[in-house]
Amino acid sequence: MLRLRLLTWDVKDTLLQLRHPVGENYSAAARVHEVHVQPEALNKSFHQAYKAQSKHFPNYGLNQGLSSKQWWTDVVKQTFILAGVHEDRLLTTIAESLYQEFCSAQNWELLPGARETLRQCHQLGIRMAVISNFDKRLEKILSHCNLRHHFEFVLTSEEAGFAKPDQRIFQKALHISGVAPHQAAHVGDNYVRDYRAARGVGMHSFLLRRAGPANNWELEVPKQHVLPSLTHLLSVIEKG
């Protein structure tokens, strides 16, 4: 059995996932103001806007003078602009509404086995924390989804000042916990940002296998490090 003192978790698409596609949420928020845009169009333009914003202003633009709220406001506005909506005052109102709305538990759902796996890890006496590329709203989201009490601390990329796969965010978590790397493990769904980055600082790590076609990383990750579902985690830890 692995002698773990600390287990850190990614959140989005590891413990929680959006209940509906982004485009549906954006379309619903616009309809409140009698603006009608197809969810599919907004979904497409969101991915374009998000990709461009992440490239030009990584980690919420913190090193370029932005706040995470302003970063997201710009993403929402650009999403609607690309979909043909240009009224700035209206877009500011919609962006504010969406920023608050995404804190609600109604927009999130737990992945299968998440709550039970967290409970079992607690029963084993394993300390737990979060390491996530997310903004400061994550504390509220976890609280609203009744998960916050499982974790000693929540370390977001906004708070840390650097985002996964930057190894400094893992090192900061280890420093906060006072746990040596070989006594810690990380669980996430991304090969580069979660699995490989955690191992780069000497931690154990496990990769949640999302549904869909096989990925290239499967050739590089030992089978015993791949989780078909969260419910497999405890058996993997026990096998060591």
Image (cartoon, rainbow, N blue to C red):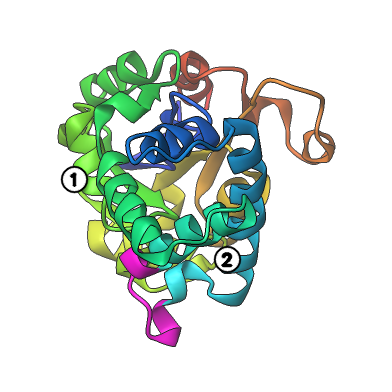
Mark 1 neighbour density, 10 Å: few (under 14) some (14–19) many (20 or more)? some
Q: Position of residue 228 (x, y in %)?
A: 62, 18
Q: Which residue is mark 1?
A: 152
Q: Which residue is mark 2?
A: 54
Please identify the residue farthest to the bottom as the structure is shown: 64
Horizontal side, residue 193 vs residue 10: left or right? right
Q: Which residues are magenta?
A: 62-70
Q: Which is more toward the observer, 9 or 145? A: 145
Q: Secondary structure at mark 2?
A: helix
Q: CA distance from mark 2 to mark 1?
A: 29 Å
Q: Name the amino acid type tagged 2.
A: Ser
Q: Secondary structure at mark 1?
A: loop
Query: Where is residue 29, by image quadrant?
Result: top left
Please identify the residue farthest to the front as the structure is shown: 34
What residue sits 24% from the left and 62% below the top?
Answer: 176
What residue sits 45% from the left and 13% below the top?
Answer: 112
Q: Name the amino acid type tagged 1.
A: Glu
